[in-house]
Image: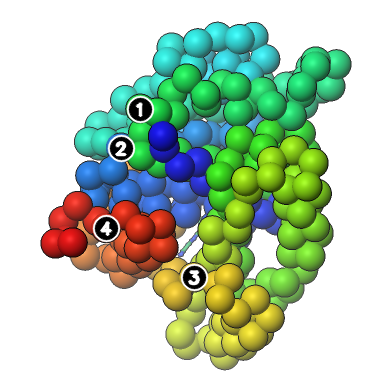
Amino acid sequence: MGKVIAVANQKGGVGKTTTTINLAASLAALEFRTLIVDADPQANSTSGLGYNPKEITTSIYECMVEGVDTHDAIIQTDFPNLDLLPSHIDLVGAEIEMINLGNREDKMKDALEDVRQEYDFVIIDCSPSLGLITINALTAADSVIVPVQCEYFALEGLGKLLNTIKIIQSRLNTRLTIEGILLTMYDLRVRLSNQVVGEVTAHFQQMVFNTIIPRNIRLSESPSFGVPALAQDAESKGAISYLNLAREILTKNGMMPHDQPA
Ligand code: ADP
Ligand code: MG
């Protein structure tokens, strides 16, 4: 049964989509079958993997709201072991359409139920909100990764997010854990970056991943080529940092990477 990990932070631009695509690609490169679930109506994970969201006819929206079989929406990407459940702008309307449905927090969980056994990991890219779609993602997930940008106001909103996670743990999904807080867009030369690392680590201690994601041009430009950084430049600092994150998560979960002797 695949582990479902949501990548969530209601702040925009903190690296959720970059983390989803590059962590998933790293797990796939280490030969773990991985599904990316694009749960953001902006569909950045979908376009970042080279698919035009406007041309998507069957998306996660149809699976959640119209009961379409999730297998029919999944796209096999050009990268071995990496599949995509794409998004579409229609997902904006799903929040409203789902309000009157029974078990409206369980729609994503239900949609993923039949496919998750076909993967080792399912990584959900959340939208920058704590609305019903994100609540669905956190209800479907086994754990959550919280990317935090090494910038001013890094900790802003984090309390609210952690509180939401607590509420979901107590009411909707008791198995939800925090996989880790991930520091992103770290710039060695910027003193503020170091301050944020110090502050977040002091505050959250062992909840923070050892791996820190540097600010790296390959990570920001690879989506325009429709590929993960790993496929564009495997030697780049960005690609390597996400491979390290994948290994850290595998170790944490007692799953050694396939390319390393046990
Ligand atoms: P979110 O999904 O949280 O809104 P994104 O992953 O889209 O955040 O990142 C926001 C912007 O920052 C994007 O333009 C992305 O390419 C860029 N970016 C994210 N992480 C990095 C990084 N480590 N180095 C350089 N640019 C990054
Ligand atoms: Mg995003």
Which residue is labeled 3 in the image? 209
Q: Considering only order in the chain, which callout, 1 or 4, is on the residue closer to the N terminus?
A: 1
Quarter holding residue 66: top right
Residue 42, how many percent across, how many down?
61, 35
CA separation, marks 2 and 3?
A: 23 Å
Q: Do the residues labelled 4 and 1 touch (CB within 8 Å)?
A: no
Find out if the beta carbon at label 2 lies less than 8 Å from the nearest ligand 1 atom. Answer: no
Q: At 24% from the left edge and 50% from the top edge, which residue is drawn? A: 30
Q: Indicate left or right for 167 with 114 as reference.
A: right
Q: Considering only order in the chain, which callout, 4 or 2, is on the residue closer to the N terminus?
A: 2
Which residue is labeled 4 in the image? 256
Q: Is residue 217 above or below residue 7?
A: below
Q: Are marks 2 and 1 in contact (CB under 8 Å)?
A: yes
Towards the viewer: 52 or 100: 100
Q: Is residue 244 above or below residue 89?
A: below
Q: Is residue 39 among what the camera can see?
A: yes
Which residue is labeled 2 in the image? 33
CA separation, marks 3 and 4?
A: 17 Å
Residue 141, how many percent across, how many down?
58, 41
Q: Considering only order in the chain, which callout, 3 or 1, is on the residue closer to the N terminus?
A: 1
Quadrant showing the C terminus: bottom left
Q: What element carries label 2?
A: loop
Which residue is labeled 1 in the image? 118
Q: What residue type is labelled 4?
A: Met
Quadrant showing the N terminus: top left
Query: According to the image, what is the colour scheme of the structure?
Result: rainbow
Q: Considering only order in the chain, which callout, 1 or 2, is on the residue closer to the N terminus?
A: 2
